[in-house]
Image: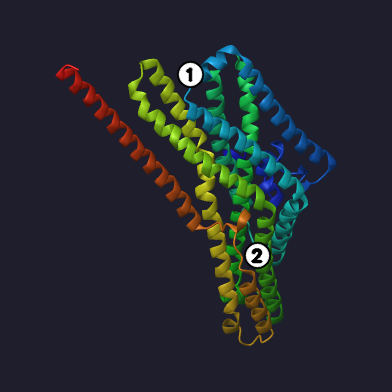
Amino acid sequence: MAVLYFFREPETVFDCAGFICILQFLMGCNGFGIRGSNFRISRASRIYSMSVAIAALCCLFGSLSVLLEAEDVRERLAKADNLVLSISALELVMSTLVFVVTVISLQVFARRHLGIYQRLAALDSRLMSDFGANLNYRKMLRKNIVVLGIVTIIYLMAINSAAVQVASGHRALFLLFALCYTIVTGGPHFTGYVHMTLAEMLGIRFRLLQQLLKPEFLNWRFPQLHVQELRIRQVVSMIQELHYLVQEINRVYALSLWAAMAHDLAMSTSELYILFGQSVGIGQQNEEENGTGYRMLGYVALVMIPPLYKLLIAPFYCDRTIYEARRCLRLVEKLDDWFPQKSSLRPLVESLMSWRIQAKIHFTSGLDVVLSRKVIGLFTSILVNYLLILIQFAMTQKMGEQIEQQKIALQEWIGF
C-alpha cells in the first residue's frame, strides 16, 4: 500500500504503535521515546517532554500578551461579541489545564505506560511462537496513519487558516500563537486516540483468543493431549493478562482522559452555540461580513471534529473490547463440557470465574465513569438537548423582535 511506502514493515507491537506514540511524544505528552524497534525511558526523553510543554505554554501566553497590547487587535476585540470572547477565553484556560494535567499525569505514569506496550509485546510473542498467530500489524498501522493524517491535516488547516484570516499586520505572532495552540490542544487529542487504539488492540487479541479456544482448532492444531492442555492453560492465562491490562490502562489514563472528556464536552456545547449564533446572524449583515461569518462557521466546524470524534467513538471501542472479553470468559466456562476427560481444567475454570466476579473489568476514566455505549448515548443526548435549547431560545428571541416591530408599526399607523 502507498500509505506505508515511507514506513518499514511492522513486525512488533512497537512498530505498530510507534507512529501514534511518536506524535504523542513530539507534543510532550508521554515520557518515553523510540530507539530502534523499542520504546525507551531516558533522561533525555523526560527533559524533552517537559521542555516542549513549558515552551509551548510560554510561547502561547507570551504571543497572546503581545497581541493584546496591539491597538488594532484591541479595537477588533471591542467590537466582538462578549459571549464569544468569554467562550474563547474559557477554551484557552480549559485547554491549558487539560494539557498540564495530561503532561504531568503521563510523566508520572510513564513507566506503567511503557509497561503496557511491553506486556502486549510479550503476549504477542507467545501468540506467534506457540500458536502461529498472525496479528496483522500492517493493517493497524495503516489505519493509524490514515485516520490521524486526515484529522491532523483538517485540524491544522482550520487553526492556521483562522490565524491567517485575523492576522492583519501581526501574521508572525498569530502563526506562533496558532502553532502553540495546536500543541496544547493536539497533545490531549492524540492521547485520547492512543487510549482508543490500545482498547482496539486488546479487542483484536480477545477475538483471536476466542478462535484459539475453539475445540475444533485445538483438536486439529494440538492433537497430543498433554500439549493441548498446556496450550489451553496458556490461552486462559493470556485472557486474564488482557483483563489486567484493561485495569492498567485505566490507572494510566484515568486523570488525563477524564480532564480531556470534560473539556471536549464543555467546548462542544460552546462551539455549537457559536455555530448556531453565527448562522442565525449571517443573513442580517452585508456581503463582506456574511463571507467572514461563513468562514468562521467553517473553522469552528472543522475544529469540532477531533473532540466530537473522541467523545462519540472512543467509548464504542472500549465497549466492544469489553464485550469481546466477556465472550472469551464464556468460552472458558465451557471448557469443562468440551474436554470432560481433562479433570485438571476444572480448578482453572473455577478460579477464573471467581476472579471475574470480583474483578468486574470495565474501561473507565477518572471518577469511575464507565466508557460504554451508554456514555455515547449520554453525550449525544446532552449535545442534542443543548442544540434544541438554542433553537428554542432563538425562536423566542425572533418572536419577541417581531412583536416589537409590530408594536412600532402599529404606533406609527395610529400616529404616536
**Colour scheme in use:** rainbow
Query: How many labels sit on residues?
Result: 2
Assign a secondary structure to mark 2.
helix
How far across and how far down the image is residue 381, in percent? 43, 50
Position of residue 123 relative to residue 345, above or below, is: above
Q: Residue at x 16, y 16 (%)?
A: 415
Residue that mark 1 sits on: 79
Where's the C terminus, which quadrant?
A: top left
Q: CA distance from mark 2 to mark 1?
A: 55 Å
Position of residue 148 relative to residue 410, above or below, is: below
How far across and how far down the image is residue 18, in percent? 69, 45
Residue extending farthest left: 414
Residue that mark 2 sits on: 243
Nearer to me, 398 or 388: 398
Quadrant in the rendering for residue 393: top left
Q: Nearer the viewer, mark 2 or mark 1?
A: 1
Nearer to me, 345 or 65: 65
Whether label 2 touches label 1, CB < 8 Å? no
How far across and how far down the image is residue 193, in percent? 60, 46
Judge left or right: residue 402 versus residue 218: left
At label 1, counting other C-alpha atoms closer than 10 Å, the crowd grade (few under 14, some 14-19, many 20 or more) is few
